[in-house]
Image (tube, rainbow, N blue to C red):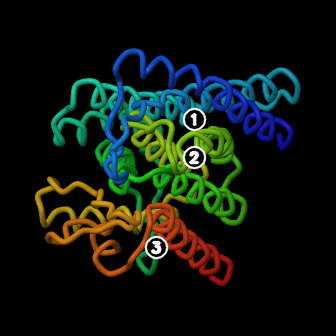
């Protein structure tokens, strides 16, 4: 199984890395570009590059499935929960692509991913959820509502802190790394079948998305990443703990609620490249820009480190408990 998972990581990395230049050229040729608002001259950057990540992840997953089926004869990836998880994450990517193309209303984007998670929820009706202090709780058919809600929330939350070169991509990589450790410590290796291909594709994409970015991920990637992390947590039996890794996104949700979700994350770069924001705080990004003198790469690093610290705390708590 280890060889199959590593192969999935490598294939997803290579496929994403090789197809991204073509995707960037195609998006620019089709006029799918957006302004990089955190740069003084606001250059136009190719949009919707996350389609390369979706392709790379599924290439990695199918590679792992093939190896496990025909070489090791392991049928873990044929479980109904896993297969319906693939349907759910592909559905989230579809919703993200529709938003990139047609600018869906926020409420529509929030609800649509849930419908693709209903088949997945059907196979979790008899699965318990372990709450701290309270203990094990069986929700029965209420899982048909709870699981789609969880998947849609995770998909949309991953998009909350996007808007800076490499920020969302790096957060996805960091969260994936810590979720791998969670699956190994307290869970089930089935979560790794999604996490390793996701990590491979995101690492490759970061090469093109890091500062100064050549491509933006678009909602197609961010919704896909959030739903894939949630699906991995469910398949790896670490959903109760993995939610802690979403703390920055959950906090961002409540801060943005102040402005009815109309706030934009970006700041205004001064002549030295430092990001400036002087209006009302309606995002965690605003809070950092108002209190710290940082360039965009420094800003992104702050959030990466913050997420890594949360990850270390979560892992340490699990090991010590």
**Residue drawn at the location 15% of the way across and 69% of the way down:** 279
Among the two numbered marks 3 and 2 on one chain, the one whose residue lies closer to the N terminus: 3
Give coordinates of residue 165: x percent, y percent: 46, 50
Q: Quadrant of residue 281?
A: bottom left
State the residue in front, 90 or 165.
Answer: 165
Task: Report whether residue 193 is seen.
Answer: no
Tag 1–tag 2 contact (CB < 8 Å): yes
Task: Give the residue at mark 1.
Answer: 82
Mark 2 surroundings within 10 Å by alpha-carbon count, few (fewer than 14), some (14 through 19), many (20 or more)? many
Mark 1 surroundings within 10 Å by alpha-carbon count, few (fewer than 14), some (14 through 19), many (20 or more)? many
Task: Report whether residue 94 is seen.
Answer: yes
Outermost residue on the bottom side: it is 320
Task: Give the residue at mark 3.
Answer: 135
State the CA–CA distance, disc 1 to disc 2: 7 Å
Give coordinates of residue 241: x percent, y percent: 52, 67
Among the two numbered marks 3 and 1 on one chain, the one whose residue lies closer to the N terminus: 1
Circle 3 or circle 1, nearest the eye: 1
Q: Which mark is residue 211?
A: none
Task: Give the residue at mark 2.
Answer: 235
């Amino acid at each position: 199984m280890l060889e199959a998972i590593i192969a999935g990581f490598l294939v997803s990395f290579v496929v994403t890395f090789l197809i991204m230049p073509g995707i960037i050229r195609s998006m620019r040729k089709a006029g799918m570009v957006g302004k990089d608002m955190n740069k003084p001259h606001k250059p136009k950057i190719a949009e919707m590059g996350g389609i390369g990540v979706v392709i790379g992840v599924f290439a990695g997953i199918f590679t792992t499935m093939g190896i496990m089926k025909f070489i090791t004869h392991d049928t873990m990836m044929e479980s109904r929960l896993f297969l319906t998880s693939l349907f759910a994450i592909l559905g989230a990517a579809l919703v993200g692509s529709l938003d990139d193309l047609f600018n869906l209303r926020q409420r529509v984007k929030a609800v649509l991913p849930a419908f693709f998670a209903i088949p997945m929820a059907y196979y979790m009706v008899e699965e318990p959820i372990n709450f701290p202090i309270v203990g094990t709780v069986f929700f029965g058919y209420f899982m048909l509502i709870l699981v789609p809600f969880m998947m849609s929330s995770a998909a949309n939350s991953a998009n909350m802190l996007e808007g800076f070169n490499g920020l969302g991509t790096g957060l996805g990589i960091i969260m994936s790394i810590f979720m791998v450790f969670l699956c190994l410590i307290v869970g089930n290796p089935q979560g790794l079948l999604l996490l390793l291909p996701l990590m491979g594709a995101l690492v490759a994409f970061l090469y093109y998305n890091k500062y100064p970015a050549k491509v933006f991920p678009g909602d197609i990637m961010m919704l896909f990443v959030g739903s894939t992390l949630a699906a991995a947590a469910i398949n790896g039996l670490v959903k109760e703990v993995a939610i802690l890794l979403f703390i920055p996104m959950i906090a961002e949700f409540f801060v943005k609620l102040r402005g009815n979700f109309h706030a934009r994350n970006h700041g205004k770069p001064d002549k030295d490249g430092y990001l400036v924001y002087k209006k009302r705080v309606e995002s965690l990004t605003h809070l950092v820009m108002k209190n710290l003198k940082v360039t965009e790469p420094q800003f992104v690093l702050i959030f990466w480190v913050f997420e890594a610290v949360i990850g270390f705390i979560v892992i340490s708590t699990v090991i010590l408990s």
